[in-house]
């Protein structure tokens, strides 16, 4: 039963994880860009502007990296949803009058 629950909630688990990583990337970008630039020898006049830039650029870089890493997994989850809907429509078009089992759907936004 727990394995079935994990499979059913797999899309949600991945999505929450990805949003959490983007949040962490934004916070880390805000706090770590200025020290990295100073250690590389840059002379910064306006540190707040660089922190804000780091807070925006770091999640974008993290998003691109996560899209490459998790994109294929999310495509497989989407294919799984499509196959389940096709199976449900194929079962629904039958005229044998059999009772269909309850289909547990994955949550989506």
Image: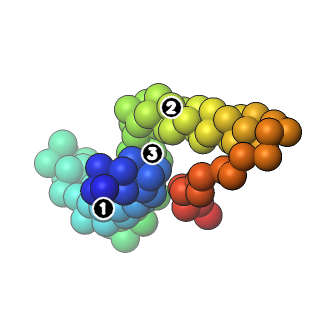
Disc 2 marks which residue? 76
* Quarter in which the C terminus is drawn: bottom right
Mark before the other along the chain sequence, 3 or 2:
3
Q: Residue at left 14%, top 48%? A: 39
Mark before the other along the chain sequence, 1 or 2:
1
Numbered disc 3: secondary structure: helix
Of marks 3 and 2, the one in the foreground: 2
Residue 28 left/right relative to 74: left
Disc 3 marks which residue? 63
Q: Residue at left 30%, top 61%? A: 24
Numbered disc 2: secondary structure: helix
Residue 11 left/right relative to 5: right
Disc 1 marks which residue? 24
Taking the image as drawn, is residue 4 in sight?
Answer: yes
Q: How far apart are marks 3 and 2 (CA)?
A: 19 Å
Q: As displayed, is residue 33 above or below residue 77?
A: below
Residue 83 coordinates in the image, percent (x, y): 63, 33
């Amino acid at each position: 039963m727990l394995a079935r629950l994990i499979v059913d909630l797999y899309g949600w688990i991945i999505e929450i994880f990805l949003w959490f990583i983007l949040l962490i990337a934004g916070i880390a970008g805000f706090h770590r860009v200025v020290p990295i630039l100073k250690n590389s020898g840059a002379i910064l006049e306006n540190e707040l502007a660089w922190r804000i830039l780091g807070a925006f650029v770091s999640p974008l870089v993290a998003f691109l990296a996560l899209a490459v890493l998790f994109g294929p997994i999310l495509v497989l989850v989407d294919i799984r949803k499509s196959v389940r809907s096709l199976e449900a429509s194929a079962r629904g078009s039958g005229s044998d009058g059999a009772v269909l089992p309850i289909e547990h759907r994955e949550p989506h936004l």
